[in-house]
Amino acid sequence: MMKERLLELLEQALVQLRAEGAVPAELEVEPQVERTRDPAHGDFATNLALVLARPARRKPRELAEALVAALPPSELVAKVEIAGPGFVNFFLSDAAWHQSVREALAAGPDFGRCDHGGGAPIQVEFVSANPTGPLHVGHGRGAAYGATVANLLEAVGYRVHREYYVNDAGRQMDILAVSVYLRYLELCGEEVPFPSNAYQGDYVWDIGATIHRNHGEDWRHPVATVFEGVPPDAPEGDKEAHIDALIGRVRELLGPDRYREVFDEALNAILANIRQDLKEFGVVYDDWFSERSLVESGAVQRAIGRLRERGHLYEKDGALWFRSTEFGDEKDRVVVRENGQTTYFASDIAYHMNKLERGYERVIDVWGADHHGYVPRVKAALQALGDDPSKLDVLLVQFAVLYRGGQKVQMSTRSGEFVTLRELRHEVGNDAARFFYVMRKAEQHLDFDLDLAKSQTADNPVYYIQYAHARVASVFRQLAEKGLVWDRDRGERHLYLLHESHEQALMKALSRFPELVLAAALAHEPHQIAHYLRELAHAFHTWYNAHQFLVEDERLRDARLALAEATRQVIANGLGLLGVSAPERM
């Protein structure tokens, strides 16, 4: 990276200043270099002289002059200026921009990657939607964002483990199992008063039909028997008490083995659907971690035991409570209910304990923004366990709002409009969906314009960027049709011929890519890459429209082709990080 080369020059200058006694020999400082916003102030600037001034007991501008004098010569730097109270501005030479083109061509698919992370293990857990129904468009944004954050961290040298936490235990799954069984009874000919709190999607019918095909009416019980002793549903009664009693009744009638088979049939069918959706969306996991495994392995009880030993639990109203208020949470939380059942939160404590026990230096959870209140209680639990809560980063993703024809799409299955991720992908395609989902900061609401995502115009950012990539491929096809061959070495030797303003701008844009990948990875901000690619595509299209590439002068032709190929490579690398394809033809 260009920034690293300038930092090396500053480090060498610091060594000389220490040797001369201009700054204290024992003074340790890490120079910082940033790109300037105004080209009049050069390409990069450092405030190192201002940072050194107080410990060195010298005026910043004097130190800046000494710093500039101590800088070793470099062909990458055209000139250095001192500005304001002591800023040092670097104006890079054309050779520096040419070097970025050469590096992009030499590194190919690896251009932009670095070893900043040093192989440190990081776990990224994302989506983790309850397997109670198909993924919807809100899950899609979490999938695109989480997958891209993982890609970025991997690109800068971290060893990333991608994980999906399967909530295959607990009340919601029991409600699903009962919903499936009631649909099975309907297929047996029973007239069932379907609970208001049950799952009502068509997929529940499908799973019930599978059980009916496999077992016929062997598992049938009369509706009157099923609802015997069950308190009334809403509006006359309490819908929560109704469904909970119904769960207990169905368990009793089916027995543990048959109930588990209904439960697993529902779980496996929906989980297979989720896996397929995500795989087709280009999202692949290293592990699908089962919540049930935490219960069955005793991890949940072990976590509760650790909290008890450390004095962070107490009993009240027959339940077991965690004193989370002692760690900044707004109220204490139940970990074991009055009926002896552990809560979802208890499983979450055990899961995060398990993550850190696996040796990850950092764990990243990608959650929906509606879970923001859950963050302090999970961090509180880690602290109470004696773990380091700073190892957990929770990234919150806002919902995506769909628009068609300028009108907000009603997010309801009853409206006839789609709400599932699969239907979104089928309408706009994977590429548009992946790109549009990460165009904005994750914590910002996203207005997803379906018409724009499908359009083949410059207004559609993903089309505009992919078109730049395809244009370069087209140029090389035209080259072959003319019986010409690109001499890459000759092109790299003659990059000095690229003195047009459009060419200079494009080369400078290419040089930013490695820095941007690192910045986006460390900030967990994929939108930085999306914005950069749009700017790069604009710089390329502007150049393409203003100049001929396949000119008679073979030196200029090869140099322009070198710049075009470097641009294509960077676009492909950037799109790859976002999970978007880079087509050769459009």
Image (tube, grey):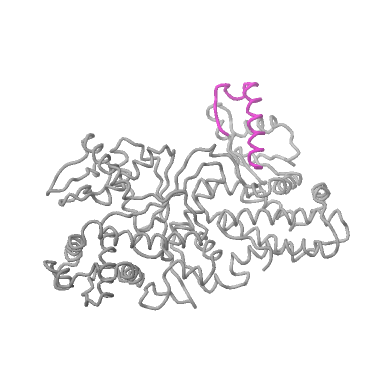
Q: Could you tell whether 311 is left or right of 19 in the image? A: left
In this rendering, is residue 343 above or below 182? above
Asked whether residue 298 is drawn in magenta, I would say no
Q: Is residue 424 left or right of residue 2?
A: left
**Residue 363 coordinates in the image, percent (x, y):** 42, 44
Q: For the C terminus, which image quadrant?
A: bottom right
Residue 356 to residue 464: above or below: above
In terms of depth relative to the viewer, which is nearer, 441 or 416?
416
Q: Nearer the viewer, residue 187 or 51?
A: 187
**Quadrant that contains the N terminus:** top right
Q: Quadrant of residue 249?
A: bottom left
Residue at 58% x, 60% y: name it: 580
Q: Which residues are magenta?
A: 1-30
**Is residue 14 located in the magenta-colored stretch of the structure?**
yes
87 left or right of 527?
right
The kind of secondary structure the magenta stretch mainly shows is: helix
Residue 382 in percent (x, y) is at 32, 40
Query: Could you say which quadrant of the image residue 8 lies in?
Result: top right
Residue 80 on image: x %, y %:
70, 39
Q: Nearer the viewer, residue 85 or 510?
A: 510
Q: Which residue is pictured at 58% across the width and 73% down the height?
A: 455
Number of numbered discs = 0
